[in-house]
Image (tube, rainbow, N blue to C red):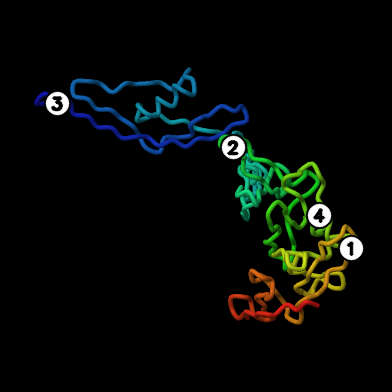
């Protein structure tokens, strides 16, 4: 003690840990020594013999000559990237849910798209609780998944209008209509069954003037290399599924079909090969006739 103060020097030790099959931790070596030097005090001394792993750890902290050696039989050499780990891809991907698009129903309640790793990535539409503190409600039945494969990128897999949600089902890529207030009623198919996910729909909008649903369609029935993309309308007037009617075609890609408030005009974006939409795309507006 000098001038009423204690002089202290501490150097923290960094240790490397090696995991052994016995699930106990051993310390292979001290990278740095750790000493306490107190005036008028001696540094504690430890022996590594007959000590527990916990005691050996502190031996490395305090004894500058402490050293633990390992034999070659304690380690296993494996090619780079091939060693086993308890942290699998499923553990990482299943750690959290992924949230997608959002919408608001006729009563002002929020609806969002939720991808669930625990259900093999199935995407589900979820409805906001009616009362604060309540539980959110799944809109999508368990046998359905909300996802479209249109133009490979997907997106725009559902549309909400009032009490009705229109969505593309992942398994068969057909369009369905579902009542939000009657979740016990199964979704109703709106497009034909082509025997597989060969025709996809996306980015739809409801046309209340003509009671139809307008969407982008990608048709892979003849070829999947360069399938034609069009803007089509799907009739909603009866329960009989009908072939969609082509409204706009001729370009390689279409996106964002939108109607004016009176459903008298329709606007959309289009582009063609070799351009990407951010390289060169066109905004078009067309007038809708009574026929």
- Residue 255 % position (x, y): 67, 71
Q: Which residue is mark 1?
A: 194
| Precedes in sequence: disc 2 or disc 1 | 2
Q: Judging from the image, what secondary structure is the residue with disc 3 in?
A: loop
Look at 76% across and 65% down and name the residue there: 213
Q: Which mark is residue 152?
A: none
| Precedes in sequence: disc 3 or disc 1 | 3
Distance between mark 2 and mark 1 Cα atoms: 42 Å
Q: Quadrant of the C terminus?
A: bottom right
Q: Which residue is mark 2?
A: 131
Look at 69% across and 57% down and name the residue there: 161
Distance between mark 3 and mark 1 Cα atoms: 87 Å
Distance between mark 3 and mark 2 Cα atoms: 64 Å
Left or right of residue 162, residue 211 in this image: right
- Are discs 3 and 1 less than 8 Å apart at CB? no
| Precedes in sequence: disc 3 or disc 2 | 3
- Residue 174 % position (x, y): 82, 59
Q: Judging from the image, what secondary structure is the residue with disc 1 in?
A: loop
Q: Choose top left, top right, bottom left or bottom right for residue 157.
A: bottom right
Q: Which residue is mark 4?
A: 171
Q: Nearer the viewer, mark 3 or mark 1?
A: 1
Q: Which residue is mark 3?
A: 5
| Precedes in sequence: disc 4 or disc 1 | 4
């Amino acid at each position: 003690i000098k001038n009423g103060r204690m002089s202290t020097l501490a150097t923290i030790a960094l240790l490397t840990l090696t995991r052994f099959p016995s699930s106990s931790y051993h310390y292979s070596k001290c990278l740095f020594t750790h000493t306490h030097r107190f005036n008028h005090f001696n540094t504690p001394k430890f022996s590594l013999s007959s000590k527990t792993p916990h005691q050996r750890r502190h031996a490395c902290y305090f004894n500058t000559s402490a050293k633990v050696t390992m034999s070659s039989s304690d380690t296993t050499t494996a090619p780079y990237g091939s060693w086993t780990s308890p942290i699998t891809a499923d553990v990482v991907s299943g750690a959290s849910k992924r949230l997608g698009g959002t919408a608001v129903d006729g009563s002002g309640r929020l609806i969002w798209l939720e991808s669930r790793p625990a259900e093999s990535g199935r995407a589900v539409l979820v409805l906001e609780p009616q009362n604060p503190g309540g539980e959110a409600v799944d809109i999508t039945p368990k046998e359905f998944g909300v996802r479209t494969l249109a133009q490979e990128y997907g997106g725009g897999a559902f549309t909400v209008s009032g009490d009705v949600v229109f969505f593309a089902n992942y398994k068969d890529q057909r369009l369905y209509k579902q009542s939000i207030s009657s979740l016990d009623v199964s979704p109703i198919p709106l497009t034909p069954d082509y025997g597989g996910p060969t025709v996809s729909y996306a980015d739809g909008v409801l046309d209340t003037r003509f009671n139809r649903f307008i969407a982008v369609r990608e048709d892979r029935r003849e070829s999947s290399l360069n399938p034609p993309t069009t803007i089509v309308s799907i009739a909603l007037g009866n329960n009989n599924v009908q072939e969609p009617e082509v409204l706009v075609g001729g370009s390689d890609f279409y996106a964002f079909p939108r109607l004016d408030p009176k459903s008298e005009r329709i606007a959309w974006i289009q582009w063609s090969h070799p351009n990407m939409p951010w390289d060169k795309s066109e905004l078009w507006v067309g007038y809708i006739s009574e026929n």
